[in-house]
Amino acid sequence: MTEREKMISGKLYNPTDKELEQLRLNARKLARKYNLTDEDQQEEQMQILRQLLPATEELPYLQAPVYFDCKLRSNGMPVPLLRNGYSIFNGTKYR
């Protein structure tokens, strides 16, 4: 069983595995690319998000900066964002 398969199945895995390191590196490169776009560059932002979240049907609006790692579902695709969900901006909850 590969480290990626272990991660997907929820088992203990080695995060320094070369395949997982490459997935993480790719996700972080795309996140940095997204973070360098301006809010009026929505087409470019959507292209980047499509690469980061290929299994997500309806892409969300994300205000930069964004950060991604490689967390995958059982089918090997990235975890999609929740529909009508929200995230806490910069780790701080605002009222």
Image: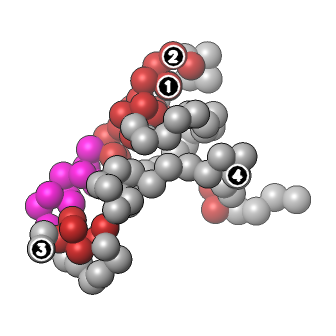
Three-letter code, disc 4? Tyr
Compare marks 2 and 3 and give the one earlier in the sequence.
Answer: 3
Residue that label 2 marks: 43
Compare marks 4 and 1 and give the one earlier in the sequence.
Answer: 1
Crowding near the residue tagged with mark 1, few <14, some 14–19, many ≥20 C-alpha atoms within 10 Å: some
Foreground tag (4 vs 3): 3
Three-letter code, disc 2? Glu
Hey, which quadrant is residue 6 in on the image?
Answer: bottom left
Q: Is residue 35 left or right of residue 77?
A: right
Query: Where is residue 59 shown, x and y percent of the image?
Result: 56, 34
The answer to whether the residues at label 2 and label 3 have Cβ atoms under 8 Å apart is no
Residue that label 1 marks: 46
Crowding near the residue tagged with mark 3, few <14, some 14–19, many ≥20 C-alpha atoms within 10 Å: few
Q: Residue furthest bottom?
A: 12
User: Residue 38 colored magenta?
Assistant: no
Q: Which mark identifies residue 59?
A: none
Residue stretch in magenta: 16-26
Residue at 27% from the left image edge and 83% from the top image edge: 12
The answer to whether the residues at label 4 and label 1 have Cβ atoms under 8 Å apart is no
Separation (CA) of disc 2 from disc 1: 5 Å
Query: Where is residue 14 shown, x and y percent of the image?
Result: 19, 76
| Residue 77 seen from this side | yes
Three-letter code, disc 1? Met
Three-letter code, disc 3? Met
Residue that label 3 marks: 1
As drawn, 1 above or below 66: below
Which secondary structure lies at badge 3? loop
Crowding near the residue tagged with mark 2, few <14, some 14–19, many ≥20 C-alpha atoms within 10 Å: few
Separation (CA) of disc 2 from disc 3: 39 Å
Residue placed most toward the observer, 31 or 81: 81
